[in-house]
Amino acid sequence: MNAAQTIYLKDYTVPAYLVDQLALDIAIHTGFARVTARLSMRRNPAATASALWLDGEDLQLEALSIDGRALSPADYVLSDAGLSITTLPEAFVLESVVRIEPDKNTQLSGLYRSKDGYFTQCEAQGFRRITFYPDRPDVMAKFSCTLHADKAAFPVLLANGNPVAQGDEANGFHWAKWEDPFAKPAYLFACVAAKLDVVEDYYTTTSGRRVRCAVYVEPGKLDQCDHALAALKKSMKWDEDVFGLEMDLEHYMIVAVGDFNMGAMENKGLNIFNTKYVLARPDTATDTDYQNIDRVVAHEYFHNWTGNRVTCRDWFQLSLKEGLTVFRDQNFGMDVHSAGVTRIQEVRTLRAAQFPEDAGPMAHPIRPASYAEINNFYTATVYEKGAEVIRMIHTLIGKAAFRQGMDLYFARHDGQAVTCEDFVAAMQDASGLDLTQFQRWYNQAGTPRLVVKSAFDAAAKRYTLTVTQHYPATPYEERMAADGLPQARGPYHLPLVIGLLDAAGKELPLRLSGETSAAGTQRVLTLREDTQTFVFEDIASEPVPSLLRGFSAPVVLDYDYSDAALTHLMAHDSDAVNRWEAGQRLATGILLKGVEHKAQGEWIPAPYVDAIRALLASAFAPAGDPALVAEALLLPSETYLAEQMAVVDPDAIHAARLALRQHLARALRSEFESAYAQLAIDAPYSPDGAQSGKRALRNACLGYLAELGDEAANALVLSHYEQAANMTDTMAALSAIANLDIPARHTVLDSFYSKWKHEALVVDKWLQVQSTSRLATTTADVRALMAHEAFDIRNPNKVYALVRAFCAANPKHFHAADGSGYKLAADVIVELDAMNPQVASRIARTFDRWKKFDAARQALARVQLERIRAHVGLSSDVSEVVSKALD
Ligand code: 0A1
Ligand code: ZN
């Protein structure tokens, strides 16, 4: 653990030595493992430096030799961070033997123990915790890996690539050797020695390669693998169909592990997944879980090209692989589920997670110019905003040119470690569109605000839109300037997709001044300047503009819509995102008024209730889409509302949102009841779009009815729970029950736990409904649950379900006026930091927006942040987050 030291993109230099081959040998013994690494190295002709640097962390060096000649400690310099050697031949074989202690590895980075065996996680810098190595993504080598372990305890031995040999050894051990034919950076290495069950299937690629697809899971869980395996085959087909990209190995393995810091990892041919994104059975997983599995399986699979075949030159370029791969998995999601719903969910996530990040102390561009701890940069900005940036290129140049750009990118860079500029250059060269200015998206932090003004000239039948960009500097720019690296700022190049609706809701043909004829009813307006004006001709009456369709750019759109205009868009816009968005704007306006008046008096307009009634009815019209209606019924979250306020009042926000839900429930009770009855499903469970959409709407109706709190409503919720035949329905009822202060609450929660205590992922759901409950006892309940047998602070999923959900998804209690929520978070961060800094740091991020609250809350948060910062031995992960927050 060390104090945060800043690393700069401008200091990048090429590695002094390259590795052609790496032969790894890992022997797992009781209490320790011995790792022998043979690196075939040569000087990098492009380098000026001549010293060799090998990263190494928590390794006990047992032997080191060059070309078979043992080195003595006088031949190298060894520190906590690695090893350097100055005198070396042009080419040589370096062999090291180290001892490591995977059983004590609570960080879950490098080689570590989980229940069923040993697993690895090497991104970003875990490989250096396995052996001495130039652990940087621009060093790509061909790996072989021989594993040795006790055969009875760890019968499955896996590594990247192809199995080439195996055998038995003395003392009940066995061994297996794997070879990966593709050169790769160390962060893509993986191995597993465990007791696991496996399910297999085959996929034949267009060019005829037969790929063995295998999912390995904890013994006894084979009945929860089908969906992940099917998702893998769907992803393989999709990448061939859409991008012409085929699987390049004969083995594609997914291994599920219960202890994992993140979602999943794209190691070449051997993905390691959090069980959360593999295991699913109708009675254990919700529709959302099923969809997430599709997306994460696809994401890791798509990395095989965008990330593995072409990787990142350095970690500043992380969005090169992540933004692009998220964009690809989003499009997969839009193709295999509903396009509209998928896009709406993305917009919601972006606004809930990324916009606040861009507005807070950790603001950074998708390609930051500096960082203290790279693990802190696996962020919503690098991933989700990164995907939006790729989507804008796609919108600006069009689908066909985008595909040509991808082809050119692979033609130029297959097998290389490259930069974001290389990607943009391929897109520019393929399309002919100048993307120089577009690159600002890679370098500027903060969410731009587009202020749009409209003017209508009835006599001239002319409609004018004036768009002004605002992009004030963020703490990131201030920090860079203080470091002597001022960042130039300027307007963005972005696509603003629009349409115009007439009074009947019809889309108008769009002819810009100077054009001879209209070109359709939807246009991509290109913005490049601080202020631009667009004039539309032949507009007979004042239209309602539908702006930023499909959320065509990651910006805040500021246009002074009347409530009537929003209701009109909600009912008629052909763009699903904007229909949804109109409803969200309307609700946001009402809720902020409610917050201002502390939900007193007549603050809910009757036309809004009518609009919601019409919305619900539209689900049952011939072309109705229940899934979209379910999305639209969901009010803006408390966190989103908080972002809209100058000084956040979490109690007033909670009260207003609850009051609006209760008001709608009372006003539309019979509509919700009849929709609930009509949407009952008889068919056997399937997570498909049609069925899950109906369930989502039915459960949204149940959620509203549960707000009534009378006997009939409570009885309905309890009977929904009793009759639920799948986890989606069970959780819909359970989360409502968790908010009710009724005696049945305890009985239900207790019986749920007894039924599911042996299914870790279901226990996580049980923890989370309690940590996100509204009830006044929640903070005390979370403390009590931390001492429950179901909780384990060393398991990231448990910490995320109980603690992170409390901090991030229960603003009323996290921001409690007495500071009890902040204290709870800080207690966990301090305790966890010593074991798993990455997870501790993720919890610390929930303090990001503390300066938006009132002075009393700020004072309470500051006490906790300072207490964390002062903690002796604090990790660089938490230190970076807390120091930036306190700045
Ligand atoms: N590359 C993975 C995410 C990931 C990153 C870091 C990890 O450990 C610290 C694990 C996974 C992905 O994008 O899916
Ligand atoms: Zn990824």
Image (tube, helix red, strand yellow):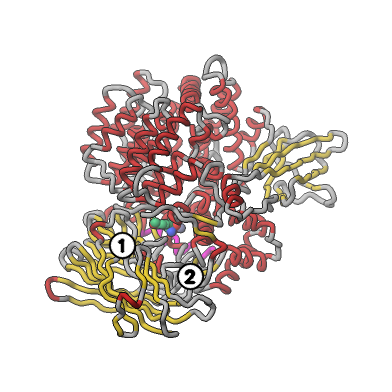
Residue 235 falls inside the magenta stretch: yes
Q: In the rendering, which numbered label is found on residue 58?
A: 1
Boundaries of the magenta span: 229-242
Instruction: Classify mark 2: helix, strand or loop.
Output: loop
Numbered circle sitting on residue 754: none
Residue 522 percent across, percent down from the top left:
70, 47
> Mark 1: which secondary structure?
loop
Q: x and y percent of residue 662 in the render?
A: 46, 22
Of the numbered discs 2 and 1, the one sitting upstream in the chain is 1
Ligand 1, seen in the image, is in the quarter at bottom left
Could you tell me which residue is drawn at 32 percent across and 22 percent down?
741
Mark 2 residue type: Asp
Q: Residues within 10 Å of mark 2 (few under 14, many from 20)?
A: many
Q: Nearer the viewer, residue 745 or 559?
A: 559
Determine the residue positioned at 29% across, 54% down.
Answer: 106
Residue drawn 26% across and 44% down? 792
Q: Which mark is residue 138?
A: 2
Question: In which image quadrant can residue 869 be found?
Answer: top left
Q: Give the camera-side residue of 469 and 544.
A: 469
